Image (cartoon, rainbow, N blue to C red):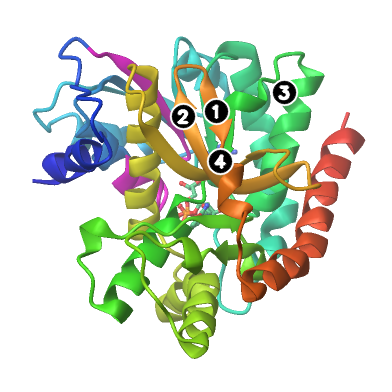
Amino acid sequence: ALQNSLSSRSVKSMGRTQYRLNPQASYKVAILGAAGGIGQPLALLVKMSPLVSSLNLYDIANVKGVAADLSHCNTPAQVSDFTGASELADCLKGVNVVVIPAGVPRKPGMTRDDLFNINASIVKTLVEAVADNCPEAFIHVISNPVNSTVPIAAEVLKQKGVYDPKKLFGVTTLDVVRANTFVAQKKNLRLIDVDVPVIGGHAGITILPLLSKTKPSVSFTDEEIHELTVRIQNAGTEVVEAKAGAGSATLSMAYAAARFVESSLRALDGDGDVYECAYVQSDVTDLPFFASRIKLGKKGVEALISSDLQGLTEYELKAVEALKGELKSSIEKGIGFAQKQP
Ligand code: NAI
């Protein structure tokens, strides 16, 4: 059923293009940080994808058991485990999509930026290995603060001479998943029909759902817009507080990350109708990185959907201006970190 639900989204987003899964599809996916709270359920969901032939799981500890457990599921992907820095290169060779949920999650009272000191170095080290071993791969960065870790990854790839901005993504799919869920609940809509673009970044006020662009078209009162926007922005904190010290969103994040992996694989496989929101190098605003809807193709980002930023409401326009300062300093912090390192 899970496998069907992942693929049925592909059916829905097919539009009229009649994309069909290629029965010979055989993509390799690596998850770095695969034994963690996100990594484990994400590995399970990716193991269920009919598009995956190899699933490489890497962590600094505890990954052998995860791989042994998953390998008993009778789906085609071959699961392999890799532990510690000495096995990282082998984990990455020939991989098409690398997903990075390695690092520490938030505890109550922490912002995503509080994770910077630990996660910045982890992401830097892992992306260096990606640059050396699978520079052509799509890179999905989940580790927070995404607003800074993606610019770090870009700098590392530039230093290695292999930066392709079309293939580096900060995963913001969870913001879209949350927006769709909360809007459907509030307006009593069928969940499967609802799509809300979320732009900006992935922390606090930098997360901006464009409720005026909700599909299907739906009207909101000013109060509803404010209440929904704030709930979507703080949804991560809702989970951090409910888990009371045991981490941040893992299951919904794994679901969202699996959706983004599946979309990337469909794009690699030639589906010409794949759209997702992601935090990428961008020229839709004056900031060098910005989350918006993108069209995915075989070579990564095929187009940035800048039309979403036209015809915004006054509330949304103000929110775009308000988020730029924080996003700019998070980007600069990431770039500064990467450029300072030897
Ligand atoms: P976790 O602590 O449960 O798992 C992290 C895993 O990374 C652990 O298994 C750990 O051993 C591993 N790890 C640590 N250093 C590593 C290294 N150098 N190489 C490989 N693996 C390493 O944390 P969880 O809950 O899975 O969260 C992971 C990250 O995802 C956090 O930074 C969190 O803030 C972020 N996150 C991002 C979201 C998004 O929407 N982009 C949503 C939720 C969390």
| Image x and y of residue 89, in percent | 54, 16
| Frontmost residue, 200 versus 145 | 200
| Image x and y of residue 242, in percent | 41, 80
Numbered disc in front, either 4 or 3: 4
Q: Is residue 244 above or below residue 5?
A: below
Q: Earlier in the sequence, mark 2 or mark 3?
A: 3
Type of the residue with mark 3: Leu
Q: Residues within 10 Å of mark 4 (few under 14, many from 20)?
A: some
Q: Earlier in the sequence, mark 4 or mark 3?
A: 3
Q: Which residue is mark 2?
A: 296
Q: Earlier in the sequence, mark 1 or mark 2?
A: 2
Type of the residue with mark 1: Val
| Frontmost residue, 166 versus 61 | 166
Q: Earlier in the sequence, mark 2 or mark 4?
A: 2
Q: Which residue is mark 1?
A: 301
Magenta range is 25-42
Question: What label does residue 157 carry, if any?
Answer: 3
Residue farthest to the right, as pictured:
340
- Magenta-span inclusion, residue 31: yes
The quadrant in which residue 279 appears is: top right
Type of the residue with mark 2: Leu
SS for dot 3: helix
How many marks the image carries: the answer is: 4
| Image x and y of residue 105, in percent | 54, 60
Separation (CA) of disc 2 from disc 4: 11 Å
Numbered disc in front, either 2 or 3: 2
Separation (CA) of disc 4 from disc 3: 25 Å
